[in-house]
Image: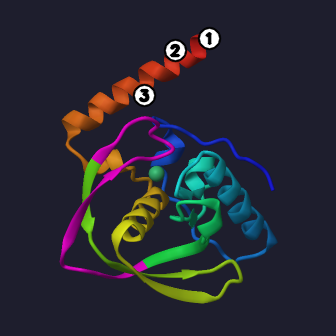
Amino acid sequence: MALLPILTAPDPRLKTKAKPVDRVDDEIRRLMDDMLETMYDAPGIGLAAPQVGVSQRVLVIDTGKTEADRKPIRMANPEIVWVSEVDSSYEEGCLSVPSHYADVVRPAQVKVRYLDHQGEIREIETDGLLATVVQHEMDHLDGVLFIDRISSLKRNMILRKLVKSKKEEAAV
Ligand code: NI
C-alpha cells in the first residue's frame, strides 16, 4: 500500500466529473486500499479518487472513531437511489479544503447502490454522519466541493485564503 498525495482547492482536477469504473479489478482494489491508507493517515473519514488525482468513480469511507472500530467502506460507481424528504445540517470539512469548515444542508438519509471491492452490487441505507459523508464524497465524483454548497460570499473568502496559503507554501 502507498500514501497518495491529496490535491487541495483550487485545482481543476477537483472540478472534473470522474468516469465510471469498467470493472473492479486488482488495480481498482489497490487504488481503494491506497486511498484508505491515505485517508487514515491524513486523518479523515472519507476520500474520493479525484482528490488523489484519479478521475474514476471510486470512494472510501470510514467513520470509526478509533483504530479498533474501523469499518472501511469501499465503493465504485455509487448511485443515490433514494433520499429522505427531511434534511439535516452538518459542519463539513474536506481534506482538499484544509482548515475550513462550514454547515451544509443535505438529505438526512440516503440509500446508495454501489459496487464493492469484489465487484458485487450492494445497497446501504445511511443516516447521520455516514449519510453526510457519502453524499460529500459522491459530490467529489461530480467535481463538486462542499464549498460549492455554501454562499458564494463564504466560498470566495475560503478560496482566497486557500490561494494565499498555496502561494506562501510555494514561496518557502
Ligand atoms: Ni471532501
Q: CA distance from mark 3 to mark 2?
A: 10 Å
- Amino acid type shown at disc 3: Leu
Residue 106 percent coordinates (x, y) = 26, 65
Indicate which disc, 1 or 3, sits on the residue closer to the N terminus. Answer: 3
- Amino acid type shown at disc 2: Glu
Badge 1 vs badge 2, beta-carbon distance below 8 Å: yes
- Disc 1 under 8 Å from ligand 1? The reply is no
- The residue drawn where x is 31% and y is 77% is 109
Horizontal side of 9 relative to 42 (left or right) equals: left
User: For mark 1, what is the residue?
Assistant: 172
Residue farthest toward the top in the current orientation of the protein: 171
User: For mark 2, what is the residue?
Assistant: 168
Identify the image quadrant of residue 154. Answer: top left
Q: In front here: 164 or 17? A: 164
Horizontal side of 19 relative to 29 (left or right) equals: left
Q: Which residues are magenta?
A: 80-102
| Residue 37 highlighted magenta (yes or no) | no
Q: How is the image coloured?
A: rainbow
Q: Is residue 92 above or below residue 125?
A: above
Q: Is residue 50 above or below residue 135?
A: above
Q: In front here: 42 or 26? A: 42
Horizontal side of 21 relative to 83 (left or right) equals: right
User: For mark 3, what is the residue?
Assistant: 162
Indicate which disc, 3 or 2, sits on the residue closer to the N terminus. Answer: 3
